[in-house]
Amino acid sequence: MTERDVHLPVAAQPTVDSIVDYTQRAEEGGYDCAWLPETWGRDGVTVLTTMAERTDSIDVGSSILNTYSRSPALLGQTAATLQEVSDGRFRLGLGPSGPVVIENWHGMEYGNPLKRTRETVDIVRQVLAGETVDYDGDEFDLNGFRLRCEAPDPSPPIEVTGMGPKAVELAGRFADGWHGIMLTPDGMEARLEDIERGAELGDRDPDDVQVTTGVTCCALDDADRARELTRQHIGFYIGGMGTFYRDALERQGYDEASEIHDAWQDGDREHALELVDENILDDLCAFGTPDETRAQLERYEAVDDLDAIAVSFPRGADEDEVRQTMDAVAPENA
C-alpha cells in the first residue's frame, strides 16, 4: 500500500505554532510522515524540533535541508540530535536546492551539485555511525573528529532529492530514499527506471530505496478556486524558481514549459499563467472538489514501486484551505 505523507506548506506561515498544528492534524489524520521544507523563512531545524516534541507517532523529516548552507558534519550532528528528540522518528532529507536560493540568499557558489550531495551523504553516514570521520573527497577533506555524543540507534534514513536522470540514478546508488517533484504518473515511471539503474550500479536492491513523489493538491468545495490556486502555484515554480522545474516538464514532453518560463522571466506573469493549460494541470496535480482530488491521487497510487505520495499545497492557499485539503485526502479518508 502506498504511504501517504504530507509536505507542509512552503509559503510563510503566521507562527511556528501554526506549522505544528498542521503536523498534529496530519498525525490525527493518519499521515505517515510530515516533511518540512526550508527555504528563506524560518530555519528548518528549530521547527522540526518543535514538531517532534509536540507529536507522538508521525515521522518528521526535512525536505529539504540544502547541502551548501550547512557543513556535512553539522548535518550529521543535526540528524543525530533530531533522531534523539523525536524518539527515532526523524528522516533526513537532503538536496542541493538551486542557484537562485544558494547564490542569491546564502551567497555561496552553486557548483557540482551531484558530487556535493554524494559526498555530503557519505560524510553524514560516517557521522551517524559514530566513526572517526576521515574523508578525502573533491568537495570536502575532513579528518580526526567523531560524534561526541552517542550515535543514534537506529540511524535515521538519508533521503535525497533530484530531478534529472543522473541525479535520480545517483540516489538509487547511495541513498536510503529519493524525493521526486513536478512529475506526472508517467513521468514517475521514467525516474523509477533511473532508480533501478542506479541500484544495479551500486549492487543494491532497488526496493531498499524509499521512493516518494510530491503531488500538489487542492481539495475545496469551490473547485474553480482550487484550480486557480493550483495554476498560480505551477506557474510560479516553472517561471520563477530557476530552470530545474522547466526542464523536468520538458523531459516529460511539455514543450510549453519553456514558453511559461520565458514569459514569467520577461515580467508577463499573466501570460505565463495563461500558458499553464489544463493539460499540464490535469496531468501533474490533484485538485477540485474533495472527491475529484481523491480520484486524481489514485493515478499516482497505481504506479508500481512508488512507495509514498507527499501531499503538498499551493503556495497561495490560506490556512483554512490547507486544512480542508489535508483532511480531504488524509489516509483515513482515502
Image (tube, grey):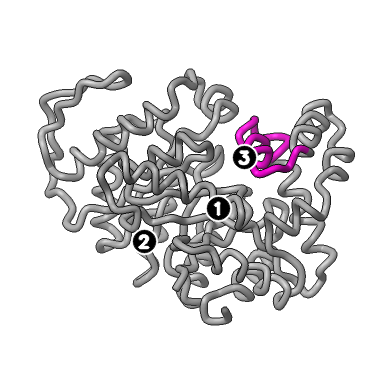
Q: Amino acid at mark 2?
A: Ala
User: At 41% across and 40% down in the image, what residue appears?
Assistant: 169
Disc 1 or 2, which lies upstream in sequence? 2
Depth check, mark 1 against mark 2: the one in front is: 1
Disc 3 or 1, which lies upstream in sequence? 1
Query: What stretch of residues is rendered in magenta?
Result: 238-255
Q: Is residue 295 visible?
A: yes
* Residue bearing the label numbered 1: 188
Q: Quadrant of residue 235?
A: top right
Q: Which mark is residue 58?
A: none
Residue 210 image point, x, y percent: 38, 56
CB atoms of marks 1 and 2 within 8 Å: no
User: At 46% across and 20% down in the image, what residue appears?
Assistant: 111
Q: Amino acid at mark 1?
A: Met
User: At 39% across and 43% down in the image, what residue appears?
Assistant: 197
Crowdedness of circle 1 by 10 Å Cα count: few (<14), some, many (20+)?
Answer: many
Q: What secondary structure predominates along the stretch shown in magenta? A: helix
Crowdedness of circle 2 by 10 Å Cα count: few (<14), some, many (20+)?
Answer: many
